[in-house]
Amino acid sequence: MNLASLRSGAWATPARLGRLGAALFLLEALILLLIALATYNVFGVMDPPGSTDFISFYAAGDLAARGLARLAYDQDLHQSAVREIFGDPRLPYYYFFYPPVFLLLCQALARLPYLAAFGLWVTATTALCYAALRRILPERRHWLLFLSFPCLFWTIGLGQNALLTAGLLGFATLTIDRRPALAGALLALIGYKPHFLVLVPVALVCGRRWRALAGFAGTAALLAGVTTLVYGSGIWTVYAAHTDEIRRIFEYGRIPFTGPVSSFAAVRVLGGSVMAAYAAQGFAASAGALAVGWLWARDVAPALRFAALAAAMPLAAPVVLFYDLMPLAVAIAWLAHDMKRTGARPWELSILALVWLVSGVAMPVSYLFHVPLGPLAPALTLALVVARGR
């Protein structure tokens, strides 16, 4: 593979992509299997023991089902619930950062036994995400590329919600031209990660999508109202007090800076101050807002508008863990959709391959070498979209 091949993208033949996808899938599946076996002490006793992030969701839902929803935001009592479910008092704490609207879903899942709930959660969110991507790129051969996307394995292994985020985002972009109010509602359902939605009003206002904006605002208000009816208005006061603790956790590294992949975390990994980290994050968010606003205001191909929003979401958000790069799969799918229409331009396929790789290795590289690659993935993707938009 030479420089000319990398520039033209000639190396990315369907057969080669299929082989690379299969190799990545097998490697990621093996790593996930080894981690799972280690968690269950197959290779020796883990001390402290490990579990999945999903146990945090399940414990919060269990507390809510018992009429104790506010205790999900008390770290000591939430940790007690987690350890009770897992059956081991040595289990480390798995934080619950989510707003009260997420408790509605967590409570529904907690009605099932833990393993059944975990299996349902992973299966349903994976199917939702794949269904959205399959609608964007109908060719059947793309299923292997989906399975090899590194964030998929991180999300499944941890039981996280990034597949749900990507699936909702994918279907929102698919429906916004035909059923804008529904698309706005689907975006509002991502309200369990409100920091991921900061650019949605920018896109909808600049794109003059007033029906979608109404659907977005109306659904958000409806979710807040239902949450208040179920858990009482005091749940918001408890959560608001909890947000200050969340800020300190991410500002000062109680969750190691090598886990998040935001611009804020990148500065902190490199030893920068909290003020410098906020400045970098503000610059990234502003750049994302400008790109999204510009593309949605212009008469460009819809695929580019959708790809811009999907790429800018994790770029603008201040708290982005490594699995939260899953929406980049939606951005890449829309870019590929546009490339089918116009053809790939120089370096595009190679840059997308780099994004694919970085999304999987950003966290290990940051942890092992203190080189924060995470923001590079959404930034490169958004840059490709802007270049096409020009």
Image: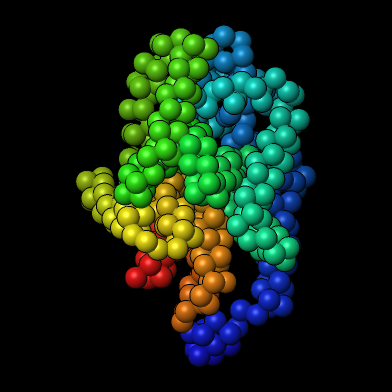
Residue 153 appears left or right of 259: right
- Find residue 387 and report its image quarter: bottom left
Residue appearing at x 48%, y 42% in the figure = 180
Residue appearing at x 59%, y 26% in the figure = 105
Give percent across and percent down for residue 125: 65, 41
Residue placed most toward the observer, 85 or 195:
195
213 in relation to 260, above or below = above
The answer to whether residue 158 is visible is yes
272 in relation to 335, above or below = above
Residue 134 appears left or right of 176: right
Give percent across and percent down for residue 4: 50, 90
Residue 389 appears left or right of 272: right
Residue appearing at x 62%, y 30% in the figure = 55
Residue placed most toward the observer, 379 or 364:
379
Residue appearing at x 33%, y 34% in the figure = 248
Residue placed most toward the observer, 310 or 94:
310
Count the labels in the image. 0
Q: Quadrant of the N terminus?
A: bottom right
Q: Residue lying at the far front in this picture: please name it.
A: 178
The answer to whether residue 44 is visible is no
Residue 63 appears left or right of 285: right
Give percent across and percent down for residue 230: 52, 12
Give percent across and percent down for residue 214: 40, 33
Residue placed most toward the observer, 156 or 226:
226
185 in relation to 15, above or below = above
- Find residue 389 and report its image quarter: bottom left
- Find residue 124 and report its image quarter: top right
> What color scheme is it?
rainbow
Q: Quadrant of the C terminus?
A: bottom left
243 in relation to 254, above or below = above
